[in-house]
């Protein structure tokens, strides 16, 4: 065990974890949907509203200057956290979904034409499927799909075949939200760049578990959501290489993103403001910066090691119960266990889990094509975070046994 990683101390920073549900201690294993927030993030939001709230960038008075400074400092924190080259390559958005939709619109309107091809994987979250489908419908373009094996590993030989002169962008999930697979995005980026094809990486399920370095990855775009990395909802990040952000048209129009407006013509502001129209969710952005500082203070390496140990423990314990099918058995995976208990409906099992205080996700996890791939209606998903414990895994196993005894 990693002796430097003190989970009991970390749990004290998350007051929500101390409560009881139906008289049982809360076991929160729905972190793939959203993570809980540490006190430092909660206090950051409260204190800002109490003492420094003011619209950013647009005022010369004290409060506005304080808010602006904190907002731009948060951008710098994000830049350092993902190792972007420039802070103006960091765009605040509403979340992963907003970021992907923005690129699908902006990149798509300029570079996608009839007969062109967009490549994604068969394990994408709906937010990295639907925007590209909408684009293909508008442009009469084609969506190509990288298949995956029964274990949940992408078939890269098939990816090689999908890359053609018509391929204009590749958009790939870094970590599958339904299987836990860590995809070989480095290889995908390298192969794509050999054909001068840009790559967008959906990091919604990776940035809170892995040490992401966008310069090392050499991805063209990287997106993630604040609420999945211990930050608030309604805020996310679109990282884009400077050359692309300079080249692309903004996907929202309004205040702040303009240099000059006349009824004849509008010119756009410089980066990053070109892509941040209107009054952004600036307090959420500031709190996201606080969340990333919190993660950094614990240490990405320690978090990854502890979560890996926790996943190994949980996988063995659940397998040992018998009559359980785990979906997603890739050699390289993290923090997600999707499974079915015999012939028990996942929704029915989830209701029993809930009465025992265990919060999991049941259903298709916004990844219906994955369920179609396995010819199932859905799974039970236990998704782990740095504040979970082996004792909580034991309680999960008790809940599984309870569901078996009542429903099998």
Image (spheres, rainbow, N blue to C red):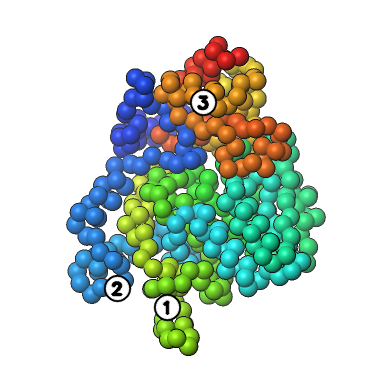
The quadrant of the rendering that contains the C terminus is: top right
Q: Residue at x 76, y 66 (%)?
A: 115
**Residue with the mark numbered 3:** 350
Can you say whether 15 is above or below 55 in the image? above
Tally of numbered discs: 3
How far apart are the alpha carbons under marks 2 and 1?
13 Å
Report helix, strand or loop for mark 2: loop
User: In the rendered view, does 352 fall on the left or right side of 198?
Assistant: left
**Residue with the mark numbered 2:** 58
206 or 269, which lies in front?
A: 269
Lower position in the chain sequence, tag 1 or tag 3: 1
Lower position in the chain sequence, tag 2 or tag 3: 2
Report helix, strand or loop for mark 3: helix
Where residue 220 appears, as percent x and y from the top left, is 59, 63
Report helix, strand or loop for mark 1: strand
Whether pointer 2 and pointer 3 mark residues with C-beta atoms closer than 8 Å, the reply is no
Which label is found at residue 258?
1
Can you say whether 67 is above or below 154 in the image? below
How far apart are the alpha carbons under marks 2 and 3?
49 Å
């Amino acid at each position: 065990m990693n002796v430097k990683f003190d989970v009991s101390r970390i749990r004290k920073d998350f007051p929500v974890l101390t409560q009881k549900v139906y008289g049982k201690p809360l076991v929160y294993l729905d972190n793939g949907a959203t993570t809980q927030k540490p006190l430092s993030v909660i206090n950051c939001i409260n204190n800002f509203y109490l003492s420094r709230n003011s619209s950013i960038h647009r005022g010369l008075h004290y409060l506005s200057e304080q808010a602006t400074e904190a907002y731009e400092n948060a951008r710098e924190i994000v830049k350092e956290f993902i190792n972007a080259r420039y802070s103006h390559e960091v765009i605040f958005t509403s979340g992963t979904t907003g970021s992907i939709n923005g690129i699908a619109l902006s990149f798509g309107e300029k570079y996608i034409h009839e007969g062109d091809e967009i490549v994604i994987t068969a394990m994408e979250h709906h937010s990295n499927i639907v925007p590209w489908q909408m684009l293909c419908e508008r442009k009469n373009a084609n969506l190509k799909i990288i298949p995956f094996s029964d274990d949940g590993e992408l078939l890269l030989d098939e990816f090689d075949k999908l890359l053609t002169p018509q391929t204009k962008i590749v958009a790939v999930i870094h970590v599958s939200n339904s299987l836990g697979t860590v995809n070989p995005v480095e290889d995908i980026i390298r192969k794509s760049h050999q054909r001068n094809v840009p790559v967008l990486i959906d990091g919604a399920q990776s940035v809170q578990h892995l040490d992401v370095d966008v310069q090392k990855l050499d991805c063209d775009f990287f997106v993630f959501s604040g609420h999945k990395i211990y930050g608030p909802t309604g805020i996310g990040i679109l990282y884009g290489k400077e050359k692309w952000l300079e080249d692309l048209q903004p996907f929202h129009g309004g205040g702040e993103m303009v240099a000059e407006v006349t009824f004849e013509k509008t010119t756009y502001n410089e980066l990053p403001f070109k892509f941040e129209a209107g009054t952004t969710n600036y307090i959420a952005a500031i709190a996201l910066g606080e969340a990333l500082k919190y993660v950094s203070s614990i240490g990405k390496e320690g978090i990854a090691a502890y979560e890996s140990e926790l996943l190994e423990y949980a996988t063995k314990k659940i397998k040992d119960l018998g009559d359980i099918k785990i979906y997603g058995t890739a050699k390289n995976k993290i923090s997600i266990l999707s499974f079915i208990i015999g012939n028990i409906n996942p929704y029915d099992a989830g209701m029993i889990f809930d009465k025992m205080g265990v919060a999991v996700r049941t259903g298709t996890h916004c990844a219906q094509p994955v369920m179609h791939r396995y010819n199932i209606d859905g799974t039970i998903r236990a998704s782990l975070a740095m504040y979970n414990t082996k004792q909580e895994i034991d309680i999960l196993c008790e809940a599984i046994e309870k569901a078996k005894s009542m429903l099998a």
